[in-house]
Amino acid sequence: QVQLQESGPGLVRPSQTLSLTCTVSGDSIGSGSYYWSWLRQPAGKGPEWIGRIHTSGNTYFNPSLKGRATISKDTSKNLFSLSLDSVTVADTAVYYCARDSETGEVWYWGQGTLITVSS
Amino acid sequence: QSALTQPASVSGSPGQSITVSCTGTNSDVGAYNFVSWYQQHPGNAPKLIIFDVTNRPSGVSHRFSGSKSGNTASLTISGLQAEDEAVYFCCSHVGSSTYVFGTGTKVTVL
């Protein structure tokens, strides 16, 4: 069974960089043909896809983030990470890491971690 | 990428059938047969219940079914049960290995 667990700071100051890590068990992020994704969900709203990294290392991002997001992976530790620059209060949300397919269906989700952007 | 449009709420009595719509454009829903649906109970992560418009993952009840016509996808829940009360989101592939979610529909069992 694939399991994902997010870890992060909880609170981030405006204009700073948000950094999150997702530790994966039950699967190897360095093999297969899956995508390892980050999504977020503001309170009371639908999920928003942030971006993803393929097992090959190729990355893809939501254009609405205007280049603020970076995703990387550490195959030796079986984890992948998200960095989101220049955060504002609008970036406050529950952040999820996930494993999805080529066509975007998300089969496995982490439990989510609440990130609050506030001074 | 603009969020796909869903009704804010749909309700039905136990045993009835309800349908949740998901309207996009000819660049997302209308362009690909890669629409998925998720069920989310409060405090939990979303759960995949339909993928590739009509397919159900193993273990998902046969009471859930999906379809698509033009730029609108639909989720039908038949034999509505109390446990079906949740928020439902659609999602569509939009090309270039990216995807977009819907606004969400709160399903209430009366």
Image: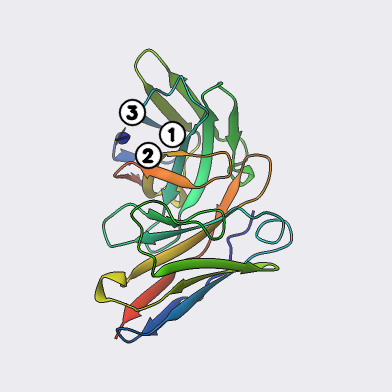
Q: Position of residue A77 (x, y in %)?
A: 34, 16
Q: Residue at x 26, y 57 (%)?
A: B43
Along the line of sight, the residue nearer the viewer: A28 or B102: A28
Chain letter for the residue marked with disc 2 in the picture: A
Q: Residues within 10 Å of mark 1 (few under 14, many from 20)?
A: few
Q: Position of residue A63 (x, y in %)?
A: 64, 43
Q: Residue at x 46, y 62 (%)?
A: B89
**Cβ–Cβ under 8 Å for marks 1 and 3:** no
Q: Position of residue A16 (x, y in %)?
A: 43, 34
Along the line of sight, the residue nearer the viewer: A43 or B88: B88
Kind of residue at disc 1: Gln
Name which of mark 1 and mark 3 comes first in the sequence. Answer: 1
What's the CA distance linking mark 3 and mark 2? Answer: 28 Å
Q: Residue at x 56, y 35 (%)?
A: A68
**Secondary structure category for the residue under label 2:** loop
The residue that label 2 is drawn on is A13
- Residue B90 is left or right of residue B40, and the answer is right
Marking on residue B81: none
B89 lies above or below A29 = below
The residue that label 3 is drawn on is A24
Kind of residue at disc 2: Arg
Instruction: Respond whether the residues carrying marks 1 and 2 are from the same subunit.
Output: yes
B29 lies above or below A64 = below
What's the CA distance linking mark 1 and mark 2? Answer: 6 Å
**Secondary structure category for the residue under label 3:** strand
**Cβ–Cβ under 8 Å for marks 1 and 2:** yes
Chain letter for the residue marked with disc 1 in the picture: A
**Secondary structure category for the residue under label 1:** loop
Please state, as top left, top right, bottom left or bottom right, where the C terminus of chain A lies in the image: top left
The residue that label 1 is drawn on is A16
Name which of mark 3 and mark 2 comes first in the sequence. Answer: 2
